[in-house]
Every structure is written in C-alpha cells, then in structure tokens.
Image (cartoon, rainbow, N blue to C red):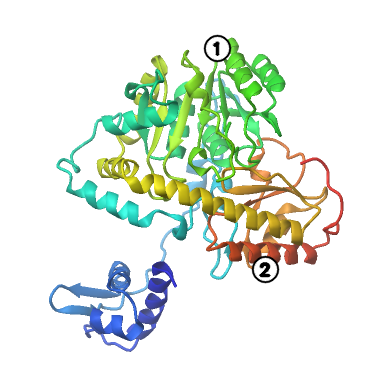
Amino acid sequence: MNDGSSMAHLLGILRVELERYPEGAKLPSSRALMEQYRLSPVTVSRAIAALVAEGLVISRPGAGVFRARPQARHRSHGDLSWQEVALGTGASPGPGGEAPSAPRSADASGVLATLAVPPAGAIDLNGGYLHPSLQPERALAGALARAGRRPGTWDRPPVEGLADLRAWFARDIAGPDSALSSTDVLITAGGQSALGTALRSLTAPGAPVLVESPTYPGMLAIARAAGLRPVPVPVDADGVRTDLLEEAFRATGARVFVCQPLFHNPTGVTLSVERRREVLRIARGAGAFVVEDDFARRLAHTDAPSLPRPLAAEDPDGVVVHVRSLTKATSASLRVAALTARGPAMGRLRATQVVDNFFVPRPLQETALELVGSPAWKRHLRSLAEALHDRRTAMAEALHRELPALRVQIPHGGYHLWLRLPDGTDETALAAAALHAGVAVTPGRPYFPAEAPAPHLRLSYISAESSERLREGIHRLRQAYDQLDFQPAGSPTGPA
C-alpha cells in the first residue's frame, strides 16, 4: 500500500472513530497510531493534518490532538437561478445587434475527462500524468530541499523567469550551438499555460487557427475560450497532411498553426522529415506562426530511433513558437515550462504572461533548476524510458490478445495508444460500460475539432500502478466490449 492509499485508509478509520469521542476529548498520540496501524510518521502526520483542515480536530502543539466542536450543517439560502441570465450563453452582441461570434465560456469537458479521478478500484487508462511509482519522488524531494536552502528562494523572480533556468531550456530545446538564447525563453506555469499565452498573444478573437485533426482537447478548449475558430487539418501516419495545410492557410487566411510534431497526442505519430521542411516552408509563405507543442520530448521509449530536432531548432526566422514542459516527465505538480519566440512575438507573449500570472513562483523554478542539474535527472529519464517501453508493450500485447482485430499504431514515445474501433461503435457507451466494468478509458470524440470520421478510444499506460494492472484493464475493456451490442471483436475495421 503506498503512502497515499495508507493515509486515505487511516483517515477513513479516524473519521469513524471520532464519533466515539465527545467534544474536546484527546485522540491517541501519533506514536500510538503509528504502532497500532503500522504506518510511518509522515502518513500519520498527513492524516492528522487532513482532519485539522476538515475542522474535525484541533491540534495543540505539545498537548495533543482533540476532537473539535461538531459543525452545524450549513443550509443553502437564496435562489441562484438569476446567475444563468447574468452569465449568459455566449458573447455580448455586437454594436449593430448582430449575433455574438464566439462563446464566453470555455468547454472544459475534454480536459476534465482526462483529469477525473476514477472510482476506487477502477484501473486508470485515462490519465495523462505519471503514476507515483514512475515519478522521481526522491529526486524531486531533494531538489525541493536544496532549493529551499538557496538564499533568495522566496524573493520575487524576474517576470521572464530565472536566467539560469531560461538558459537551460534554450540549450535543451535547440542544442548548445543553436542561435536560441535565454532571452528567447519565457518561463510559464506548465504547458497548458504556455499554449494559452501563445494563442491569445499571436492572434485576435474571432480569427481562425489551424489545428491537427485529431488533436489535444486542452488546446481546443484554449482556442475556443479565446474566441478563436479551430480549423482542422487531417493527420495521417506521417503527421499533418502538408498539402491540406497549405490549402487551409490559403482558404482561411489563418496566421497560426498548432502542432505536435513528436509523438502526437492522440495518434502517437511523428512528423516525417520531408513534412517538417514543408511545414516551415508553408508557414513562412503564409506569414504565419507555428506553435510547436513538444510535450513528449522526454517520453521517448528505449526502442525509439534518434529523435528529430525540434522545429524551433531549424527555424532562423522566428516562425516557430515552441512549448517545452517538465511536467509530463516528472509530476503533475511541477508546473514549469518554457515558451520560446524571437522578435516582436516575444514582447506579446511576455505582456500576456505578466497580465495573467505576473510570474511563475520562484521556489518552483529553483526546484526545477536543481532537478535538471542533478545526476538524478538523467537517471530518471533512462528508467522512465524503460518503464514506458515495458508498459506500452504490455498494453499492446494485451490488446492483440483480447481484441485482436482492433487497429492500433504502436508509437515509440508518449504515453498512450490510439485505438480505432469498428464503424458503428458507440464509443461513449463503450467508455461508460468500461467504467462500470472497472476500467477508465477516454472516448475519441473530444479529440476532433469537427465531425469525427470514425470511433476511437485513447488508452493511457502511465497512470495505472503496473503492467499487470494494464493487462487487467484491457481484459476488463474486452468484457465491456462483449457486453454491448457492437460488431464482434473479430470484425474488420476501416482505416485507422
């Protein structure tokens, strides 16, 4: 049992036990709880802190922990329905009374689906962050401790980010001999924040923005919340279709194209060498920016071939705005990323970042700097590459065994498989049946900016506890599939 589940178990026990204690009664000491339940001091301390935060107990240093006064239940007062009118359903009408061009509220359903915590006992094939067993917890703890001892750690950082961290990102993205320098880097609070800053800085509300289809739902949510119009450009086995990209620029007049050239989410494909050159040529010809979301650079598997350099490393003209995050390869809570640009675009990005967030907290930046500068960083990346390879292999083999006719492309990086379902499959019903069977999966529909051409599922292999749990998850998915009135699992499917 890991620390998180141990703490949850102890909390459940203590909440029940509290009913036996009158107000002001003293609870057993931490040492007694440690001995009784065979738990670590940290686990017991965290459980007590959670009870204090809930207002169930009072901690008096040197005296002990006591039951607090039972809280009266709060009753809801007032009619809140007026808020529906005040919030509205869209943007305000134009000065001539014309209909609004874009909604005021963001549709976060696609993002929330991947952030949802599955019910207890369910196997998570849905999440986008490393399971605790894959995180460099000791390295993070050491980096955090060293950062906390640095003089000035709690001072205000430069709005662009710490100079040393910006210089590290510049080298990490474009190599030591690249023209990219620390002045071309802006530190942001994670990749999602970087994408939001980029899209709102580089184009105006109501404008079109070209996106891959399928693509990351979080990016679609950002674009629509900013009042932009996502225009899909199809992806095939070699990445974005550059012939259609050129046509889309010409037809729409768009000035931004957002892409994931390496281990694309959700398909896992990598943009071919020929198309990489074409993307840059087409964007230059259109006078447009390419926002390169390089989210999976540190998620390559041990059998991956040599990775192509980022588009930003091949761009002398400031066409590419690059996003590189540390979050995916470390922890969901290490929300530190870099956004790179040259020329006037950097001024726009910087202004948007300052208005939105002022700056990324310095202790978090110092921790990131300590982590990437330590020997533990490279060791972690090596072990992560092996673990991702093993998990991908386990899931792919389980799919071949349980659902042999369903088409899936095996990537050499990233953390998910994109599963093509037979035509006519209700992917939403399948995902619901799977959850009922004890496995959480992601329907493919939110990944398409327009009508989905076929039903899909996205299966993640980084949020479950182990390869064995991944195999069990696929077995449960097969059970859910068989329970629904779809084509047999051996039926042929269309193109992936």
Pick the residue in front: 45 or 136. 136
Q: Position of residue 137 (x, y in %)?
A: 37, 56
Q: How far apart are labels 1 and 2 at the CA level?
A: 51 Å
Label 1 sits on a secondary structure element that is loop
Q: Quadrant of residue 18?
A: bottom left
Q: Position of residue 155 (x, y in %)?
A: 18, 39
Q: Which mark is residue 437?
A: 2
Q: Position of residue 277 (x, y in %)?
A: 60, 18
Q: Position of residue 90 (x, y in %)?
A: 55, 36
Question: Circle 1 sits on which residue?
Answer: 287
In this orientation, does residue 82 appear?
no
Q: Which mark is residue 472?
A: none
Label 2 sits on a secondary structure element that is helix
Look at 41% across and 42% down and name the residue there. Answer: 326
Return the disc, 1 or 2, that comes first in the chain's sequence.
Answer: 1
> Does residue 285 lie above or below 105 as drawn?
above
Q: Amino acid at mark 1?
A: Gly
Pick the residue in front: 452 or 128. 128
Look at 42% across and 18% down and name the residue there. Answer: 345
Q: Amino acid at mark 2?
A: Ala
Look at 54% across and 41% down and name the residue there. Answer: 218
> Does residue 29 lie above or below 112 as drawn?
below
Dot 2 alpha-carbon crowd within 10 angstroms: few under 14, some 14 to 19, many 20 or more = many
Image side of residue 128 versus residue 371, left or right: right
Q: Tags 1 and 2 in contact by the CB under 8 Å rule?
A: no
Q: Quadrant of residue 242?
A: top right
Q: Quadrant of the C terminus?
A: top right
Dot 1 alpha-carbon crowd within 10 angstroms: few under 14, some 14 to 19, many 20 or more = some
